[in-house]
Amino acid sequence: MSPSDGAAPARWVPGSGEARRHVLVAVVNNRPGVLNRVASLMRARNFNIESLAVGHTERPDVSRMTITLWGDDVAVEQVAKQLYKLIDVLKVQDVSAERRIEHELALIKVNAGSRTRKEVLAIVEMYRARVVDVAADALVIEATGTEEEIDALVALVRGFGIKEMVRTGSIVMVRGAQAVEVNA
Amino acid sequence: MRMTKSERAAAPAERTVGQSAARHARDGHLPGAGSAAARAVEEARARMFQSARPRRRTRIGADVVCEAILRQGVDVIFGYPGGVILPLYDVFADHPQLRHILVRHEQAAGHAADGYARATGKVGVCLATSGPAATNLVTAIGTAMLDSVPIVAITGNVPAALLGKDAFQEIDITGITLPITKHNWLVRDADELPRVFAEAFHIARTGRPGPVHIDITKDALQGETRAEHPATVSLPGFRPNLDGHARQLRAAAALIDAAQRPVVLAGRGVLVADAAADLRAFAEKAQIPVAHTLLGIGAIDETHPLGYGYMGMHGWKHVNRAIQEADLLVALGMRFDDRVTGKVSTFAPHARIIHVDIDPAEIGKNVSVDVPIVGDVGRVLRALLPLVRERKPEERGAYFEHLAAMRRESESSSWHGSGAWRDGLLSADFVVARIGEATGHDATLVSDVGQNQMWMARYAGFRRPHSHISSGGLGTMGYAVPAAMGAAVGRPEKETWAIVGDGGFQMTMQELATLVQDRIPVRIAILDNKRLGMIRQWQEIVYAGNYHSASLLGPDYVKLAAAYAIPAFKASTPEQVDEAIAGARAADGPALVWFEIAQEQNVFPMMPAGKGLSDLIESWEGANE
Ligand SMILES: Cc1ncc(C[n+]2csc(CCOP(=O)(O)OP(=O)(O)O)c2C)c(N)n1
Ligand SMILES: [Mg+2]
């Protein structure tokens, strides 16, 4: 009495699916060390974070993290489940499939002497970015937008010479009246 | 005034030094001198050397610690004193209901708390001071983490004002234990201790159990407090799901009713949930054979007609074959560890999988499953029971006959019933089986790690829950003796044996002194092959016989025991085995048996790393061991 003959198909191994970009929202207690717990878990579990942004929310006792990462759906679900095990994590939601606003902020210090300033300003205009500081031969551009929008802006100004750049990583909010809620 | 040349050269410098000395005289050497923070640091340093407490005193943080432990129904802690934890030792005498057992190394305190927890189902508590003592606990905390054992580890730390200053014996121990605990706390204020202890015990024992760690600054232990112990805890981020989802339960029942070749895989979750009776009822009603993991030993009586045996890397061939042929696996409180599945892509290729676990993160982590059920194994089984169709054993006649035939073949293959391995040397499987027999299969048997662990799992014969204790997930050598110590303290009515290799025994044998001093009646069986046996086995089979560092010298264990006034016995031939066991059992207190076993016996079958359950090695160089 043995199973029907013929080779059985290989069992599927979790995490071996196609990787895509995911955006997770984690609502956490606003306490010292929570960021460390989240970061430590990601490192220990071999999850690769692309960006992580953390900040205050409408509730003083609660902070919110936006985590972007690559992985197949099962691997990212595993991330969410592991995060849930942290006592200080109140809620985790994968919003990758939701209609959402997903923005980050960038500050870019670009070479811009008298010869090139006009051109740089035109690009700033086109991307609805702003100039927040002007020096003799450099400008600081402040831009908000999706990761792709900022990537595009960066690509355009790169030719002028970027002296310095800093990006916050995405923060995200689902469109419509519905909110990422925590029952607490 | 006349100056020499050298005096002149020194003069300006002297002036600056003089000036700054004057400033220091005003403000002290402390960074931020004069500030409140700096004053706190100075005071804290002074209090590091504070003298004994006054006779009449108010309630302090250290009292809260003792009260909290007793309130949780725990009356023993395993610990070791040191500078910043002394305020706690200073009040122990005022809480005489709390028994403190002084170990000989903090790692042993941790393993003892772990053994206590596994044997009793209660939370174990261990205690150490800061710095090196705290880091000594790390191995034990990690051991408890990987096997989901509820322990509360308590450490002292330097006074709050000195945190981060690399004070004497200061280490970032909460940073170190963060990834190996369910949760940890650094408490700097005595008023917080009642809440933290209530949360800690709750988290340790609730849902999937595990270790927690509380680090307490010396000033928090010494601070006066009136804070009361809370009746409940509020942890919005910690609400384990206990009951399986109704739809999934129905889906599971449908698969179970339809299955032709089902196998239950029972893990430690069954024991944690106290669900051995529920498992038996379920298996009997649906007539499903039960295989178990290493930590699932005891979930079903091995002599039960549906008890099929130990699975995995060194499990029984018949069990692994049944899994590879199964059309349905009902996995209960187990986590598809790589020692159980081997290569996942070839694991149980014909089987659908129902996976019940209280930790949702375990479901789909290592193996994809068809029906996930998040919940307490006992509750899920009780909910599932009325949903599954009742069967008679005859309905599975052909299947059961096939299983029985496989079992007969596999159980006879690597067993040395005569007690003799090649050339009549003492065979380890025989020794372990005799210990099981002699103790009526009712003792608590604690194994170490290596071949001894596999022999015990395969041959001792387990009948009741919590009678088998072993470090499965972390595989911590040196675990057996201290864990047995905790198990014996927790379940004094059960005879307790530590079955340990010569390598593992030499890792924590300092605890012989604790056994004597605290009269803990652990029987120690050293399976002495004068080898790191499991290492030697791998080197023989995987590394072409390149035996580097596999042989190790040991002492004369009878003389060693004698130095501790522990009765000791020795058996080097099959004929001497029963008498030696009987001698140890007759001792009033701890005892030791030195079994000189064959030096090159292997544990078979063996699933080589990277291979699957169908790729078992059953013999080597013609020798069926
Ligand atoms: C703390 C620790 N160090 C190393 C190992 C690796 N290891 C696993 S089994 C083993 C050999 C154990 O030898 P022994 O205690 O004599 O037991 P035997 O295999 O001979 O029964 C070793 C070194 C381990 N599991 N734990
Ligand atoms: Mg050995």
Image (cartoon, coloured by chain):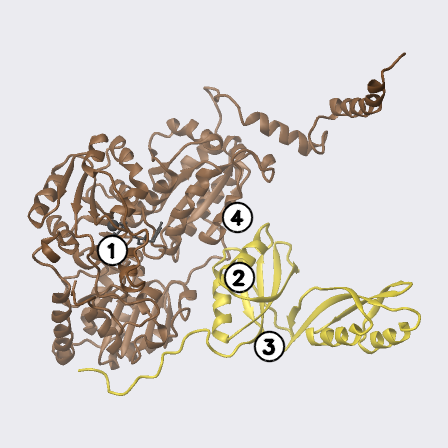
Chain colours: A yellow, B brown
The amino acid on which the numbered mark 2 sits, given as a three-letter code, is: Met
Residue B542 appears in which quarter of the rendering? bottom left
Q: Is mark 1 within 8 Å of ligand 1?
A: yes
- Is residue A46 visible in this depiction of the protein? yes
For the N terminus of chain A, the quadrant is bottom left
In the rendering, which numbered label is found on residue B394?
A: none
Q: Secondary structure at mark 2?
A: helix
Q: Position of residue B28 (x, y in %)?
A: 71, 26
Q: CA distance from mark 1 to mark 4?
A: 34 Å
Chain identifier of the residue bearing label 1 in the image: B
Q: Are marks 3 and 2 in contact (CB under 8 Å)?
A: no
The residue sitting at 43% across, 52% down in the picture is B203
Q: Position of residue B227 (x, y in %)?
A: 51, 37
Q: CA distance from mark 3 to mark 2?
A: 23 Å
- Is residue B182 visible in this depiction of the protein? no
- Of tags 3 and 4, the one toward the viewer is 4
Which residue is farthest right?
A: A114
The amino acid on which the numbered mark 4 sits, given as a three-letter code, is: Gly
Which residue is farthest top?
A: B1
Q: On the picture, is B107 further left or further right than B606?
A: right
- Residue occupied by mark 1: B451
Are marks 2 and 4 in one subunit? no
- Of tags 3 and 1, the one toward the viewer is 1
Q: Secondary structure at mark 1?
A: helix
Q: Position of residue B608 (x, y in %)?
A: 30, 67
Q: Earlier in the sequence, mark 3 or mark 2?
A: 2
Q: CA distance from mark 3 to mark 4?
A: 36 Å
- Residue occupied by mark 2: A42
